Structure formats: C-alpha cells, structure tokens
Image: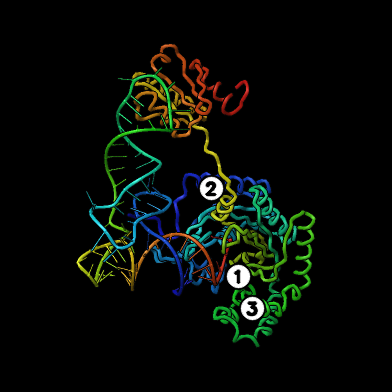
Amino acid sequence: MIKTVKGCKDIYEKDIRLFHYSKKVLSETAEQYGYTEIVTPIIEYTELFQRSVGQDTDIVEKEMYTFEDKGGRSLTLRPEITASIARSYVEHHFETIPSPLRLYYIGPCFRYEKPQKGRYREFYQFGVEAIGDISPLLDTEVISLAFTIAKRFSLEEIKVKLNSIGCKECRPVYKDALKNALKPHYDELCDNCKKRFHTNPLRILDCKKESDELKKSLPKIADYLCKECKEHFDTVKKHLTLMDIPFELDNSLVRGLDYYTKTVFEVVSTNLGAQNALLGGGRYDYLIEELGGRHIPAVGFAMGIERLITILEAQEKTVEKQPVLYIAYQKNTLKEAIDIANILRDSGFIVLMDTKGGNFKNQLERSAKQHSLYTIIIGEEEKEKRILQIKNMETKEQKEIPSDQIITFLKNHIRGEKNA
RNA sequence: GUGGGUGUAGCUCAAUGGUUAGAGUACCGGACUGUGGCUCCGGUUGUUGGGGGUUCAAAUCUCCUCACCCACCCCA
C-alpha cells in the first residue's frame, strides 16, 4: 500500500473543517488590521534561504528539501515564508508603495525533521509581515494582532514571551561579553554548545542541557542594549502594557533564525508538548538589505496551523458540518427530484441526492446516516399534486409544501431569513 | 542523527507456545415496494507490519528491519 510520505498527512473530515475555520479567522483578523494577502511560490532558489535564514542555522544546514531541477538550478522547498516575502519586496520594488507595507500569507512549508507531536515535515504557516517602518508601534501592532488571534480562538493556557536581542551595534558587544563569561566554562558545555560558542553563542542561552546556575551567572542582553535598542524595547513594553497585553520577559529567548534583531517574541501553549511554540516572530531590520534591497526595517511573525489545530482539539473545539438536504424519490420521479436538487443548489443549499433508490425506508435510513437536516420526499403522489414532503430529521415532523414554495420555506427554517 | 514506547480485520481491542486467529463496531444484503439511526438474520474483510532464528508447534520466545507515536535536538 502506498502511504503518505513520512511526516506528511492528509487533512479531511473534522480536521479540514477546523483547518478552513482557522484560515478564515486568521485571514479575517489580518485583514481587519489592514494586512493584505500575498501568495509566493513554494519553491525558491536555495541561495535565498542560505542568505536569509542563515548558513549556520539548523534549518539550512540539515533540514531543507533541496534538489536540482532539469536545468541544473539548485531549488529548495521553502522551510519558511518570511524570506520569500523579503525576496518579493526587493524584486518588485515594494519600497515605492507607501510604508509600512502590511502583508499576510498562509501556505505549506517543508522541513526534513523527525516528526513528533506538533512537528511535521509538511506543515502550514500563517504569518504577517509589516515592512518599512522602524517604529516600535509596529512591533506592538504585530504582537497585538497575534494576541487578538489568540483571543478569537479563545486559546487558554497561552502566554506571550518577549525579549530584545539588539542590533548590529550592540549585539556584537554582548556576544563578546558572553563569550568571555563562557570561556572559563567551555569544557562544561555540551558538544552542541561548544560549536555554538563559535557560530552563534546566543543560542547557548536557550540550551536545556546547560545548568541554570551557569546561565544565571552569564551577562544579560538587556544590560548591553545600545541607547536606540533600549528605547525601542522600553516603548514596546510600555505600549503592550497600555494595550493590556500580558507578556513575560525572557532573556533566554533568542530564536533560531539569523535575521532577527531587536524585538523577538513567542506565544507558547502547554497543550503542544515539547513543541510548545504556537507562533514566533520579531523584528528583522537588515533582511531586506541583505537580499540586495535598501535598508528597510520590518517586523512579523509566523504561526503553525497544525499547532493551532492541536490546541483547538485539546480544547474540544469542533466546527459543525453545513446543513445538508437529502432527496428521496421513486423511479418515476427521478427527473423531478434532480430538478429540485439543482434549484436548491442554485439557492446555495447543500443537497445530496439518493443514488441507490429502493423504498423510502432505505432512503430515509441513508439520509439519517448522512446527518441531514431535512429529507425532501418526492414520490408519485407529490408529483401529481405539485407538492413536496419535507421531513425534519431531528424532530421527525413532516410537512407538505407546494413545490414552488420550497426555497422560501427552507430559507426561513435554515437560515432564519424573514420574508425571503 | 540518538533514545523510549507501540504494531493483530476499515476502526477499538481479545487470544496460557497448542484446533481453522476471535469479539465489538463499521460496511454490504435480507426481514422491509411510502417513512430514518432500533431489532433480528445472514455475509465480506487478516501475508498477526516485513524478514530470519528457536520449536513437533510462534500473534506469543529471539534477532534484524520497517512504520507510527513520544522525547532529545531544532522550531511553527
């Protein structure tokens, strides 16, 4: 038997209803904040991710689906989408559009990792990017958008974690201070962190293997932020408080992608197991420049749809099926039944035609198994009298309705429309 | 890449090393040619994940392998 590729899954039934519902809430919320959708290709030149996400990151080093096409180009299935947005911004000269440019996206991403709870090889990301403005108000707008989303899904047991990791001016100073503090303890570090010591010492801060004691003794980035970064961060915190958005400072929050600067944040949930980050993001003021554009600051976040759905399921959220009408008929009334079905479909109803025939008992039974709201019965008697039997499957009440009043009746009873 | 757990019918699960691997459920048909999820009767479904080994005999013991789940790592 041919199965789904490892780490990939089919989405159907309950899951696809939650998936559609999630997409709807996400895109509506983003649009209410003035963000418009952008769709970019799933495949990009490998170089894009090497230069944006960073050559030394785990994502680029070992998690990308990279292949050569028939023309010899090195292509990669996107492991995230921010890089594509930045590429698109530079390519189409979006700097000529009034700033900030507010965009949102939703689509599949791919990472070659060992699957586990909340972690798939193909997964959907929703995200927003606000580009072209250094104001801390844009940071808080993006965080507020994330927070609003969490509220609209009634997410419980979540919290916002916040930190600032400085800029090109102050981060190198902090890095040196960190390295100096770590040097005497180099031999105690785990193998991974020994490597990080040279490539990206900040990541040692969120390594779970190192002792809390050691971590506590290390210098804190907050004490090394330059004047600009410190003011920026203070304003972000002040505005979050004004906006009644609860947050928790976490000076070990450093993120795994190289392009982040200043503000970084995560929303985490206890329902997600070890993969507890529902969404993560931050400011990336040099990414556009790195990809050949002007110096354009930006901020955004990305969210895992499957993780969102995992939380919704843990909270026993379900999305009801749309009401279904079922049509039962007899041999001689097939044409009338098909006509009625099509008329109802043109009015926007979901209509199932019985396909197996037989007596009404069998057809009613099948109708019930489809969880239909009404069964519409058209037999020879009804055909002659130009009426339809409409049976409410919950109350078992049955009514005779003149054929030409069926739409009015259903609109009243299903959609609650008056005088329709 | 490193650990741990689990693999028996579409699904949920039984079966002391010993007949032809069962049950519930689902599905199909009938009782039942104008009124539903009930009931009754009947029926279909298995390389016991795969391969080797031990044994008179393996779903059961053993080894290898694969898949899934969980964790490390990383991240959404």
Q: Position of residue A363 (x, y in %)?
A: 39, 27
**Where is mark 2, residue-wise?**
A19
Q: Is residue A175 visible?
A: no
What secondary structure is found at the residue carrying circle 1? loop
- Secondary structure state at the residue bearing disc 2: helix
Position of residue A374 relative to residue A256, above or below, is: above
List x then y, in percent, for residue B72: 54, 71
- Going by the numbered disc 2, the residue's amino acid type is Phe
| Residue A198 horizontal side relative to residue A141, left or right | left
Residue A313, given in percent of the width and then of the height, sits at 56, 50
CA neighbours of label 1 inside 10 A, class few (<14), some (14 to 19), many (20+): some
From the viewer's side, name the closer residue of A155 and A65. Answer: A155
Looking at the picture, tell me which residue is in the foreground, A348 or B16. Answer: B16
Check disc 1 and report the residue beneath it.
A258
Report the chain holding disc 2: A
Left/right placement of residue A17 relative to residue A418 reads left
Residue found at x 48% / y 17%: A403
Q: Are marks 2 and 1 in contact (CB under 8 Å)?
A: no
Q: Is residue A357 above or below residue A161?
A: above
**Alpha carbon distance from label 2 to label 1:** 30 Å
Q: Quadrant of residue A300?
A: bottom right
* Left or right for A289, reference A410: right
Question: Which residue carries the number 3 mark?
Answer: A211
